[in-house]
Image (cartoon, rainbow, N blue to C red):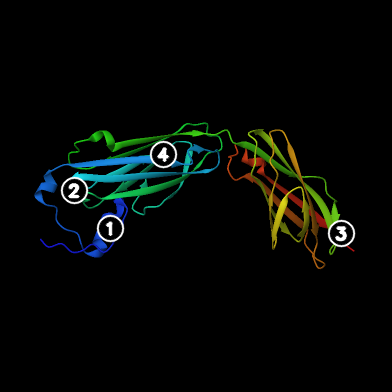
Amino acid sequence: MGRKVITVLSCAFITVVVCALAAGTVRPAAAADQWGSADLRVTISTAPKVAQPGQPITYLVKVRNRGPGDAVLPVLRVRMPRDLRIVHVDVAECGLAKNGRVVVCPSSVDVPAGTTGSVRITGLVRPAARGPLRARATLTSEVVDPNEADNVAEAVTKVGPGADLAVRFGPAVGQVRPGHRFAVRAEVRNRGPRTVRDAFLFLRQQQARLVSASGARCRRWRSFAWCTLPPLRPGRTGLVHLVFRVPPHAVQPVRATAVVFSGRLGDRSPANNRARMRLALHSA
């Protein structure tokens, strides 16, 4: 039976049959493929190598059919760790089992020998996770596999201790006047156990605009500000002095929200990463 050229050159292992259907290239399997064997292989890796509480982690699962025959209706199953919330899977044909922990990627058509592919699964590590995180990938087919040892792969990932960052606004004036400036202090404390060298303070203001800041390098954009703090050792507090200006025609109370986080380290106590401020307007 004649074969047509496959127009899509690169497809994920799980979606190769979908691409073939779209290009009109599905062919019946030869008798040798139907009753032969297919050596399937699966591997799994993570990034980063050490997970952080409250931070994302990505699992890369790679699959291959080494032949000699087609893999008949292969299915990839990836059991994810309990302390992980799955947020994205990059292959549309994959879905979650009822328990929400197993990613199932079935193929509705046989997959030819030599086919390779991958699926990426992204999740958020729960703040209370202690680790290690264990993920297990299993690849099966309805034909004999002469080497079943590489049909299963496991990734074991340590969870780092992270650092507990907290932020609050220091004492400020009780009321502010339209058209005037006022000062406030943001206090960022590292409760440990790790030194934080990349602490960031994100600010959002309403009915006020940031005029200047000291104690951190801040960049402004409209009603937002992004501040980079100096390194914070465990037990130390960084002070960011902020000066705001109230618009002359302001009629609503002044509000500000501050959020602190590390770009690299996780945080086991995210509840204290946020602080809010509200100041009433002084009537003339």
Using the image, tell me which numbered label, if any, was put on residue 70: 2
Spot occupied by residue 106 in the image (x, y as percentages of width and height): 29, 48
Q: Secondary structure at mark 1?
A: helix
Label 3, on which residue? 282
Q: Is residue 101 visible?
A: no
- Nearer mark to the viewer, of 2 and 1: 2
> Disc 1 versus disc 4: distance between alpha carbons?
26 Å
Q: Residue furthest bottom?
A: 249
Label 4, on which residue? 80
Give the mark nearer the N terminus: 3 vs 1.
1
Q: Secondary structure at mark 2?
A: loop
- Nearer mark to the viewer, of 4 and 3: 4
Q: Residue furthest right?
A: 284
- Nearer mark to the viewer, of 4 and 2: 2
For the point 66% across and 33% down, the residue is 192
Spot occupied by residue 4 in the image (x, y as percentages of width and height): 18, 64
